[in-house]
């Protein structure tokens, strides 16, 4: 009976992933060239699949299984994959059945509409135009959160849908520690008067040539082309299609953007396609969403990819292939890819100042749900925080409060993931180096198996078996702390800017 | 009640197309770069979708609707789209419910297996290796046919699944008329001793350049890039994804192959994506399969694309872009693209001798079902017919009986479509010219709207509203006859070879 029900559960979970995979493939197709007149029909199909998927998740068999497992002593189950699958299934079922279908449809329609208006508002730098939709989106997401769990602050509930088990107050504390450390550091760097910028990073080179060089670098690092393909797209993104199928994109507007977004998306990709067979069996492939996923992309992009040792190994290859770099010595190049300079846009930010951008958005969202800020005050709150934390003020709403599409998409409670991902990285790196003091020496020698194996064995292979807080404790022996990442940043940038 | 049931029917038909569209997209994805390790998972999803689709087509509501409409005076329905949709639905339902699911699965597995063995056998030119699978495939397809309608010759039933309403004896008669006319014509041409071959057609040019030139030609002819994209692939093919979404491929192994397969697939594509709104409403988009679809691809490839007037207009563009053609005068080029020379492979054949290749396969299939030939005698039957009709004999099974994958795929009863498509073209062209004697003058002037509009208004817009025989009668006022195509061929090739 129990075993039968587990098999039934596995089947339902598998089917849910099938629908997700088709949706992902359709998303990939949109960006890879779907004919424009095909869009509305393909959207019809998407809608159909969503309804089918929900119907299957909420069918009588599912109801029966939820009932059965709710009355079962789940904590006593020895197989950790099985136990986790059952818990996730119950949570997912509850979540979807608690929110009325009408509200789900309303959110879908409202966010689609809001994205269209956002595009317009963004182009015209006009927050006033977008405000009614901003208001509507926040209101709908709040209602959704209340249906799911009205005993909690809606912000907690919404953030939990991206970062499972999140403790918002704890995140706020970690962020305060982080910003208290890095705002002065940024100021100290500015005071040195040093600017490492070089034009070669902002140039775009022959696309065939540079994509070849970049892919060679990726493959050498460990990108598995049997489990991934890449495409070109306006916005770099990773699409997880199947357990052994994660597709990445980049664009070639300039060298730095293309190179590091390639490494970034590769990090997502590797995490996506590396679950072990047991995780796949229980449909837990793809990796933990939100901050943990971001930590894996940024590990390859930054912890590995912007390190001195990484380019010690790869810079000759770059110079060999892109002649403009032949006149730039290694030191100049290395400093340039780590130049610190506050930017008004999150996506243009360097490694250090980047952290403050998501913190600003997170604090605004939190203040909103704590009743300290209203929708009509968000622009002012935004501009004040940019002034305070980064010392700069947006010239208009387009480069200010409208710069990200997330709120238009209904992604309320997502932004913390980006900076949290960095905190995870600091702590993961600390453990990695404790276990393997030769980590960066290996990188310098072009041996990436140490890094790859460590991430695989500790993180990638498990898919979504653990919650974020379970994972960090298992891997590093501690709760998430800010100090490791802060130490990493101080060490790196004090060195780079000769700050003692 | 009636209207309600029609709405329900429309919904079921729509859902069936959704599943078909996803399958088509997944097929497209395989060829456009799906990571190799993703294959087995994507096949799992395909299998799931097939079962879902069958379950929906055979669900209680469908059963009820079939019952309801079988008891309804369908012939009295005034709306021709509605009437046709109901009839098609009943036929489809009967077909799928009559064949036991076990047999359907067995056919699927056997044909998948057979394709793998075929690849091996093809590479090693070893018909003996493939023979047991050939035997199995024919045996399974025969059983399927007997389940569908055991009052008919299985060959009739199988052919009907590709060319609806086909009358096999009639096709045999038409083919006899055709071969009686063209075998002597081919001989006369051979007797002239003329060979128009030029190396430039067999060369492959810079891919970027030649794809640009070819797409410019396609767009000028009428290819709608809002409804189609193209990709590169080993085998040129058209994938109909949605009512306004047909994707075409070509490859660039040589100029002639790429140019004319582009035009060929464009013909399929235009037919695919041009159904009118009413046809779409009743899920009848995509065009009539088999011979009629082939007639539309070959109309653009041959009737238009290998005509003197077409290249009178486009040859300067070709010479401008591909310098190798600058030394070839128009007359030489035109003769070269129409050079007649029997080939051992169907896919290498010229316009005239091509017809005999499908006829040979059709006759062999027909003889098999008439009990005149056994599986173990097919190779010999094949070689004899090639000798008799084309005057050549395959050196081995790879270039002989194993050259096509169709039988391995379980496509028994398909081959007639290719040559039948040409017969349709002859008759369509005759009507077009009768209505518009200036057809080819327009083409020579680069005006393609006459041809496009005629095909659209008479054929493309209706999707699958008519059966093939209804369509030809509606469009040309007559049953399908061989004389129009024979006259066209005689006229063209007598002229080309100076035969009086």
Image (cartoon, coloured by chain):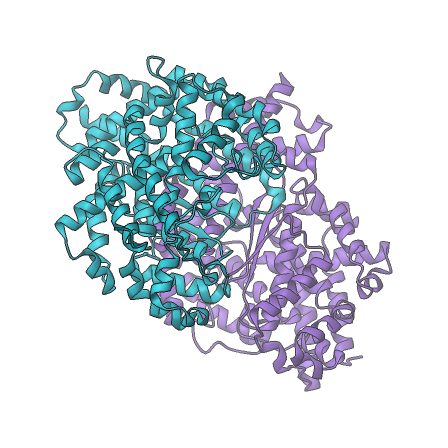
Chain colours: A cyan, B purple
The answer to whether one can see residue A253 in this image is yes
**Residue in the picture at 38% in, 33% down:** A359
State the image quarter where residue A41 is shown.
Answer: top right
Residue A58 relative to residue B9: left or right: left
Looking at the picture, how far across and down is residue B262, in whole percent?
Answer: 62, 62
Residue A479 in the image: above or below residue B404? above
Residue B491 relative to residue B399: left or right: right
**Residue in the picture at 46% in, 54% down:** A231
Residue B141 in the image: above or below residue B93? below
Residue B346 in the image: above or below residue A76? below
Choose between B48 and A181: the one closer to the eye. Answer: A181
State the image quarter where residue A320 is shown.
Answer: bottom left
The answer to whether one can see residue A415 in this image is no
State the image quarter where residue B357 is shown.
Answer: bottom right
Q: Quadrant of the N terminus of chain B?
A: top right
Looking at the picture, how far across and down is residue B46, in whole percent?
Answer: 41, 43
Looking at the picture, how far across and down is residue A446, in whole percent?
Answer: 25, 64
Choose between B131 and A319: the one closer to the eye. Answer: A319
């Amino acid at each position: 009976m129990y075993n039968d029900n587990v098999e039934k559960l596995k089947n339902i979970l598998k089917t849910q992933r099938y629908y997700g995979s088709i949706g992902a493939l359709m998303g990939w197709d949109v960006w890879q060239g779907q004919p424009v007149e095909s869009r509305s029909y393909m959207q019809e199909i998407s809608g159909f699949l969503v309804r089918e998927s929900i119907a299957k998740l909420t069918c009588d068999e599912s109801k029966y299984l939820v009932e059965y497992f709710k009355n079962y002593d789940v904590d006593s189950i020895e197989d950790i994959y099985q136990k986790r699958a059952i818990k996730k299934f119950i949570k997912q079922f509850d979540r979807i059945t608690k929110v009325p279908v009408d509200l789900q449809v309303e959110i879908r329609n409202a966010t689609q509409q809001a994205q269209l208006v956002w595009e317009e508002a963004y182009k015209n730098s006009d927050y006033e135009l977008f405000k009614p939709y901003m208001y509507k989106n926040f209101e709908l997401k709040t209602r959704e959160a209340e249906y799911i769990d009205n005993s909690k602050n809606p912000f907690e509930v919404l953030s939990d849908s991206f970062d499972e088990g999140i403790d918002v107050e704890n995140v706020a504390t970690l962020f305060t520690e982080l910003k208290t450390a890095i705002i002065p550091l940024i100021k100290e760097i500015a005071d040195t008067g040093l600017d490492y910028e070089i034009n070669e990073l902002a140039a775009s080179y022959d696309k065939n040539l540079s994509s070849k060089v970049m892919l060679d670098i990726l493959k050498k690092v460990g990108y598995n082309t049997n489990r991934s393909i890449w495409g070109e797209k306006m916005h770099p993104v990773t699409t997880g299609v199947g357990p052994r199928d994660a597709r990445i994109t980049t664009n070639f507007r300039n060298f730095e953007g293309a190179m590091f977004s390639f490494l970034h998306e590769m990090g997502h990709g590797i995490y996506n396609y590396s679950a072990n067979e047991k995780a796949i069996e229980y449909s837990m492939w793809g990796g933990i969403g939100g901050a943990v996923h971001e930590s894996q992309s940024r590990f390859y992009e930054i912890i590995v990819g912007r390190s001195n040792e990484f380019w010690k190994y790869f810079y000759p290859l770059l110079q060999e292939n892109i002649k403009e770099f032949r006149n730039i010595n290694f030191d100049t190049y290395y400093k340039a890819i780590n130049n610190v300079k506050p930017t008004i846009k999150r996506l243009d930010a360097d490694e250090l100042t980047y952290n403050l951008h998501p913190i600003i958005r997170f604090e605004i969202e939190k203040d909103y749900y704590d009743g300290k800020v209203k929708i009509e005050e968000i622009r002012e709150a935004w501009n004040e925080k940019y002034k305070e934390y980064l010392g700069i003020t947006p010239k208009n709403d387009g480069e200010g409060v409208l710069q990200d599409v997330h709120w238009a998409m209904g992604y309320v409670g997502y932004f913390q993931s980006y900076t949290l991902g960095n905190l995870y990285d600091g702590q993961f790196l600390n453990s990695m180096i404790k276990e393997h003091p030769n980590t960066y020496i290996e990188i310098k020698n072009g041996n990436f198996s140490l890094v790859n194996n460590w991430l695989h064995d500790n993180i990638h292979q498990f898919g979504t078996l653990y919650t974020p807080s379970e994972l960090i404790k298992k891997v590093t022996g501690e709760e998430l702390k800010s100090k490791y990442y802060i130490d990493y940043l101080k060490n790196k940038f004090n060195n780079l800017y000769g700050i003692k």
